[in-house]
Amino acid sequence: DGAASIESIAHKIQESLSVSKRHRFWETQPVGQFKDLGDASLPEGPIEQPITLSEVRPDPYTLPALYEWSTCDVDNDATAAEVYTLLANNYVEDDDNMFRFNYSKEFLRWTLRPPGYFKAWHIGVRVKANKKLVAFITGVPARIRAGNEVVRMAEVNFLCVHKKLRSKRLAPVLIKEVTRRVHREDMWQAAYTAGVVLPTPIATCQYWHRSLNPKKLIDVGFSRLGARMTMSRTIRLYKLPPLPATPGFRNMEFRDVPAVTALLRDYLSRFVVAPDLDEKDVEHWLLPREDVVDSFLVESPDSHEITDFCSFYTLPSLILNNATYSNLKAAYSFYNVATKTPLLQLMNDALIVAKQKDYDVFNALDVMENESFLKDLKFGPGDGMLHYYLYNYRLKHALKPSELGLVLL
Ligand SMILES: CCCCCCCCCCCCCC(=O)SCCNC(=O)CCNC(=O)[C@H](O)C(C)(C)COP(=O)(O)OP(=O)(O)OC[C@H]1O[C@@H](n2cnc3c(N)ncnc32)[C@H](O)[C@@H]1OP(=O)(O)O
Ligand SMILES: CNCCCN(C)c1ncc(F)c(N2CC(C(=O)NCc3cnc4ccccn34)C2)n1
C-alpha cells in the first residue's frame, strides 16, 4: 500500500544518507569501507594480516577517568543480575521506543558460554566510585565458514552504553577493547549484526512477524488492525490447530545430537556464510532449554530416521508504556532443515507449538530458505532491518539474505 512504499523510500534515503555520513571510528577499522563499494579489484578474505601476540597491546584501552574495566563473570548470580538489569534498561529499542529487548539471565548465560568461551570477552565498564555497571560488550568464539574458508571468529554482541552516557564516544573504546582481547587469543575476524547501517553490511535482512496473539499485539501497538478487518475476523485469520500435523514431530533430545549435527552440517553447506557446527556446538546451541531455546525434529515412524529439524529462541520484549501488558513473548526462528517434510508444513508445526507455549509473536528473518514460507504462513514484513557484518574479512559481493546461513542472537 502507499504507506509501505513511502516507508521503504524513507528507508532508502536514510540508508543513502548514512553511506555519505562520516564514520570517524569505523573509517579507522579493517572493515569494508563505503568508498570501496564497487571496487572489484579488492581480494576476498582478511583485510589486515595477523600480528604476533607480543605485538598485541598488553594493557586495556584508556577509559574516561570516572570509569574502570570490569570483566563480568556471568556464572556469578549477582553479576549476571547486573548484566541483565543494564540490558533490560538500556539495550535495543524499536524506533518508536515502545519496546526494549528483555534478554533473560538464563538466555545470557546460555549465549555467553558456548564451547571454548573466554570469560575475558564478557567486558563491563563500572563507575569507579560506586561500582555501578554502565556499559557492556561481549564476544564468543565461533567457527564461521565464509565461502570455502572456515575462519575462527568472535561473534560480538550486547554492545550497550547506559542511556545517561550516550554520545560520549564510549562505544569505540568498548569495540577496541573487545578487539584487543580477541587478538590476544590469536583471532583476527569477527561477525556481528546491528539494526543500524555501518561500514559495510555483507547482507541486509528483513524481519517478518507471524501474529500468534493478534489481540494483544494490536492492544500494545505491535500491529495494527488491517483495513476492513474486525478484531474477531483477525483472531480467526491467525487461528492455529492445537497439535502439530507431522507424524513423528517431537522435542530434540541428547541422543539426537549426532543425527541433527549431520542434518545441519549438510544443509548449512549450501550457504555462502554459515557456522561450522560440530556435535559439541549442536549440543550447546540446539538442545532445548526452557524459555531460552526450543528444538524439534521429525523421526520417521517406521525407519526412525531423523529427516527434519526446526528451532526457535525466546527473546521477550519489555512493553514500555502500556497499562495492561508489560511483556511481549516473542519466538525467533533459529535453524530449520527440511529434507522429507515440506518446509511450509514443518514451520507451521513450529507456529503451532509456539502458540501452545503462549508466545505472542513468531519472528523470522528472510535468511536461508525462509522466504519460501513467510507469506503463505501469514507472516507480515516488519519495520526492522538487520544488517550483517564481518570484521577484517572482505567478501567480493554483498550477499542476498537467501545466501546467508547464520543467525545471531
Ligand atoms: C577481531 C575481533 C574484532 C571484534 C570487534 C568487531 C566489531 C564489533 C562492533 C560492535 C557490534 C555490536 C553488535 C550489537 O550489539 S548491536 C546492538 C547495539 N546496542 C544497542 O543498540 C543498545 C542501545 N544503544 C546503545 O547502547 C548505544 O547507542 C551504543 C552502545 C549502541 C552506541 O553508543 P552511543 O550511542 O553512545 O555512541 P558513541 O558516541 O559511544 O559512539 C558512536 C560511534 O559508535 C558507532 N555505533 C553506534 N551504534 C553501533 C553499533 N550497534 N555497532 C557498532 N558501532 C556502533 C557509531 O557509528 C559511531 O561510530 P562512527 O559512525 O563515528 O564511526
Ligand atoms: C544484535 N543482535 C541482533 C539481534 C537482535 N534482534 C533480535 C533484533 N535486532 C534488530 C531488530 F530490528 C530486531 N527486530 C525484531 C523486529 C521486531 O520485533 N521489532 C519490534 C520490536 C519488538 N521489540 C523490540 C525491541 C527492539 C527493537 C524492535 N522491537 C525488529 N531484532
Image (cartoon, rainbow, N blue to C red):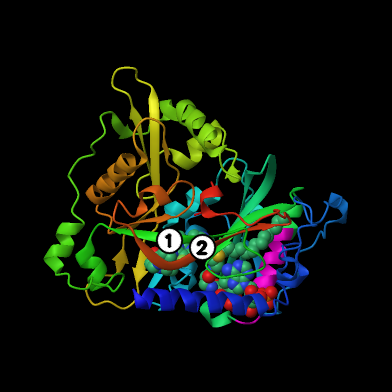
Q: Position of residue 377 (x, y in %)?
A: 30, 51
Identify the residue shown where x is 42% and y is 41%.
Answer: 336
Mark 2 close to ligand 2, CB under 8 Å: yes
Categorize mark 2 by other alpha carbons within 10 Å: few (<14), some (14-19), many (20+): some
Label 1 near label 2: C-beta < 8 Å?
A: yes
Mark 2 or mark 1: whose residue is earlier in sequence: 1
Of the four image quadrants, the one with ligand 2 is bottom left
Identify the residue shown where x is 30% and y is 51%.
Answer: 376
Determine whether 323 is above or below 248 in the image.
below
Mark 1 lies on residue: 207
Mark 1 close to ligand 2, CB under 8 Å: yes
Q: Position of residue 217 (x, y in %)?
A: 26, 67
Mark 2 lies on residue: 386
Q: Amino acid at mark 2?
A: Leu
Q: Is residue 170 magenta?
A: yes
Extreme residue in the left direction: 232
Q: Amino acid at mark 1?
A: Tyr
> Regarding mark 2 in the picture, which secondary structure is present there?
strand
What residue range appears in magenta?
167-179
From this viewpoint, is residue 201 visible? yes
Nearest the camera: 93 or 247? 247
Q: Position of residue 95 (x, y in %)?
A: 44, 76
Secondary structure predominantly adopted by residues drawn in magenta: helix
